[in-house]
Amino acid sequence: MDNRFDNYPEDFNRPTSNGSRNDIKEKETATSVFRNRLKNFLKFHWNEFKYTVMGLIIAILFLTIGFFKTLLIIILYFLGKLIGQLKDGNPKILFRLENFFNRY
């Protein structure tokens, strides 16, 4: 039996350095194109994305734990945010609540 495997280098399964660099460049380019598109989308449609995710989370909460438990979570969230902003010295929510109640 003829042994022809002695002529191959030990790393013959690895691609050559030129081929692997091109593959890496192609993957990086595809990844960077996706990242650039995602950054551009989020830059120009940030509010759309933010409120879509928030709506999705609220919908999932409604379906899994029910309406009143979800409503309680939302109220407690805003109450915690209000207290946190007051402790930080940022009364933005208080001004908004004051404007809201002054209208009605």
Image (cartoon, grey):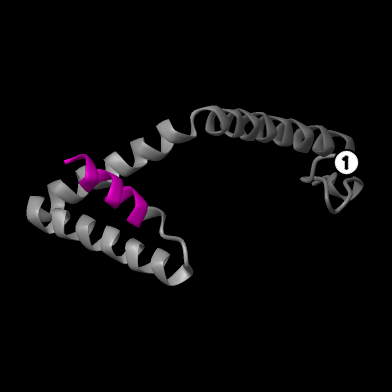
Near-viewer residue (102 or 89): 102
Instruction: Residue 103 in the image: state x and y as whole percent.
Output: 22, 40
Residue 50, image quadrant? top left
Q: Main secondary structure of the magenta part?
A: helix
Between 86 and 52, the one nearer to me in the picture: 86
Q: Secondary structure at mark 1?
A: helix
| Horizontal side, residue 72 vs residue 13: left or right | left
Which residue is at a point 36% across and 52% down the rendered structure image?
95
Closer-to-camera residue (19/96): 96
The answer to whether 19 is drawn above or below residue 68 in the figure is: above
Q: Quadrant of the C terminus?
A: top left
Residue at 23% x, 45% y: name it.
102
Q: How many marks?
A: 1
Residue closer to the observer: 101 or 29 = 101
Residue 76 pos. (x, y %): 23, 63
The x and y percentages for residue 36 are 65, 31
Residue beneath the point at 54% across and 27% down: 44
Say above or below: 104 vs 29.
Answer: below
Identify which amino acid the numbered label 1 is placed on: Ser
Residue 18 belongs to the span the image colors magenta: no
User: Is 92 on the left or on the right of 31, as rendered?
Assistant: left
Residue that sits furthest to the bottom in the current view? 87
Label 1 Cα crowd, 10 Å radius (few <14 / some 14-19 / many 20+): few
Q: Position of residue 28 (x, y in %)?
A: 72, 36
**Residue beneath disc 1:** 17
Q: Residue at x 34, y 68 (%)?
A: 83
**Side of 15 relative to 74 (left or right):** right
Residue 59 in which image quadrant: top left
The stretch drawn in magenta includes residue 95 = yes
User: The magenta stretch spans which residues?
Assistant: 94-104
